[in-house]
Amino acid sequence: MAGEFELISKYFAKQKLTRGDVELSQGDDCALLISPPGTQIAVSTDSLVAGTHFLENANSKWIGHKALASNISDLAAMGAEPAWVSMAISLPEPDEKWLEGFCEGFFSLADAHNLQLIGGDTTRGPLSITLTIQGFVPIGKALLRSGAQIGDKVFVSGTLGNSHAGLEVILDKEKRLLPNASVLEKSHYCASSRANFGMLLRDKASSCIDISDGLISDIKHIMARSNVGADLHCDKLPVSQELVEFCQDKQTAQNYALKSGEEYELCFTVPQHLIESVRQVAENESVQITEIGEITDSKMLKLFRNNKALQENVAGFDHFRS
């Protein structure tokens, strides 16, 4: 049975990507790193725990992707360029087939972002993965939650709701018979990265957050930090055709979009005079963006459908229940 150092050498030390700002990576007590002049380092840590964020029998390649995608999404929300990541992983036993799939999903996404694994720890225990990711942003240019102004428009990237539908497929065997169930299940684990788009929103978006707890919860974080309110139009929420077919009608799909967590799309606000500039950036990057509301002075979240006010009764995202 392989031990800790054998596992590190065989799986986690095999990344071919090496960055010039990494003087020393795995193999010593610490990594030695060089940050570019004129930048701040953005740092985020996330944990994924079996039974809470994924099922133990899930495709390990998808788990590897999801673990890193959730961390990259935090950098995207700040407009930061991914650079380094460290990992602490605990395993009930050294399952080499599982590790091979996990590393395939993890490193393919890392390499696509010029993101180097610089160290970490492996130990025996319940299956869990903790990543600390670090990236660069020019001093004073980070996207924050606190910059939204009254009159700014609220946008989201991509489509929303697929992750929630995928979670239902995972937890309810009967829903595996519905249209597009397998596509939506994969969507729950394999989110698209918005890192490049996030960097291009610097100096354009007034605030930004990634959608990890559900739009209805995450927009409230912007509201709280910016001391503003927001009007959201539920009938404008972008949903995929696969989700509409799964739900059998568009309004139900848009209700999913309102509460769906672990989407890792961006919700951001834009001053009106910069909207066309943002639309051009999105078009150049082939990123779909949709205007779904505006920032107000009400200090409240108000939901509308077809310009009629709705009573808020949709909660945000809950992780897997134990």
Image (cartoon, grey):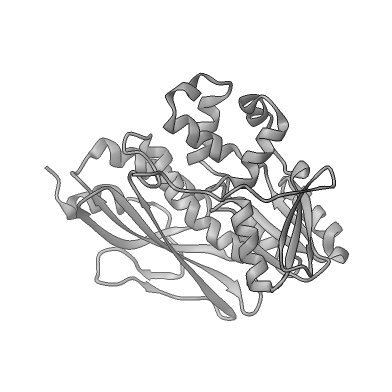
- In-image side of 41 versus 52 (left or right): right
> Is residue 143 visible in the rendered structure shown here?
no
Q: Nearer the viewer, residue 125 or 87?
A: 125
In terms of image quadrants, where is residue 275? Answer: bottom right
The number of numbered badges drawn on the structure is 0
> Is residue 140 visible in the rendered structure shown here?
yes
Q: Residue at x 45, y 52 (%)?
A: 68
Residue 186 on image: x %, y %: 50, 34
Above or below, 252 relative to 38: above
Q: Residue at x 65, y 79 (%)?
A: 140
Q: Residue furthest left?
A: 1
Above or below, 74 relative to 35: above
Picture quarter with the C terminus: top left
Picture quarter with the N terminus: top left
Above or below, 35 relative to 204: below
Residue 158 on image: x %, y %: 68, 45
Q: Residue at x 66, y 24 (%)?
A: 248
Q: Residue at x 67, y 51 (%)?
A: 312
Residue 88 on image: x %, y %: 30, 59
Q: Residue furthest top?
A: 177
- In-image side of 152 versus 320 (left or right): right
Q: Nearer the viewer, residue 203 or 304?
A: 304
Q: Nearer the viewer, residue 189 or 281?
A: 189
